[in-house]
Amino acid sequence: MLVAQRRDALLDRLRRDGRLVAKELADELGVSEDSVRRDLRELAAAGLCQRVYGGALPVSPAVADYAGRQTVAVESKERIARAGARLVVPGCTAIIDGGTTALAVVRALPRDLRATIVTHSPTVAVALAMHPTVEVLVLGGRLFKHSVVACGAAAAEAAAGVTADIFLLGVTGVHHEAGLTTGDADEAAMKRALASRAGDTYVMASAEKIGAASPFRVLQVTEVTGIITDLPADSPARRDLLDARAVLVDAD
C-alpha cells in the first residue's frame, strides 16, 4: 500500500470509528508502528486529526476562525445556549466565556434579567449592553483573536478578584478520554482560572465538539458540574461520557 493510500485509509477509519490506535493499525496494515505514527504526525500537521497518546482523535471544527464558526452547528448551539441561559438566575453572578455559543446564551437571556455577568469577551460584553438590568464586568488583557477573548497574565489577575455562582465554559473539544480541550495554551489557562472562581462550571458542548479534541486540556470531564449537550439518548459518545463519570445536562 502506498503512503498516500495508507493515509487515506487512516482518515476513513477515523471518520468511521472516531479514534485511531497506532498499534492496532500497524498490526492490521502490516507496517511498523513508527510508520503509522509518522502518518499521524503528517495528518495532524495538515490539520486533519489531533494526535493523542497512542493514536489520534478527530479535530474539532470549532478550531476554525471566529467568522467561520458562526455557521457551524447553529441549531445545536442555540439549544445548548437556551439551556445555559436558564442557569443564569435572577440575582446571581455568572461568568460567561467567549465564542459563538456564548453569544447565543446572551441572546437567550430574558431582557428583564437582573444579574451580574462577568466576561473576558468584548463581543459578549457588547451584546449584554442590550440587557438594561444586567450589570456587566469586563476582564481585560491580551486579545486572543481566534475566540475574541482576553487572555494572559493581566486577564488571569483580574479573574482572581471575581467570585461567581456559575461559569458557562466554552471549549473546542469534549472527549471522554482527552477531556475538555481548546487550541491555545493561554486560553486554556484562562478558562481554568475562571472555572476556579465559580461555584459551578457547566460546559456548553454543541454537536461539533463532541468526540473531538484540541491540543490543550482545560479540565477533565469529571472536574465540571455538568456538560450541557443535545446528544441523542442512544449516542455512543453519550455512553462514553457517562462511562467516564461525566454529568450530562440535556438541552431542549
Image (cartoon, rainbow, N blue to C red):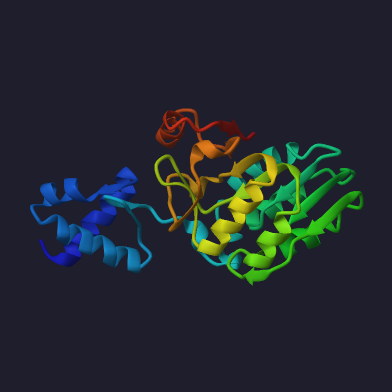
Q: Quadrant of residue 72?
A: bottom right
Query: Which residue does the image show at 64% across and 46% down from the upper left?
Result: 196
- The spot of residue 153 in percent (x, y) is 64, 66
Query: Which residue does the image show at 22% across and 63% down from the upper left?
Result: 39
Say whether residue 140 is left or right of residue 234. Answer: right
- The spot of residue 252 in percent (x, y) is 64, 34
- The spot of residue 79 in percent (x, y) is 64, 41
Question: Depth check: 41 or 77 in front?
Answer: 41
Figure check: 140 above or below 245 = below
Can the viewer see residue 148? no
- The spot of residue 210 in percent (x, y) is 47, 45
Q: Quadrant of residue 18?
A: top left
Question: Depth check: 4 or 192 in front?
Answer: 192
Say whether residue 11 is left or right of residue 186. Answer: left
Say whether residue 42 is left or right of residue 245. Answer: left
Can the viewer see residue 1? yes
* Quadrant location, the N terminus: bottom left
Q: Quadrant of residue 4?
A: bottom left
Query: Which residue does the image show at 28% across and 64% down from the upper left?
Result: 41
Query: Which residue does the image show at 54% across and 39% down from the upper left?
Result: 223
Question: Depth check: 98 or 185 in front?
Answer: 185
Q: List the single residue furthest toward the left.
A: 30
Instruction: Report the label total.
Output: 0
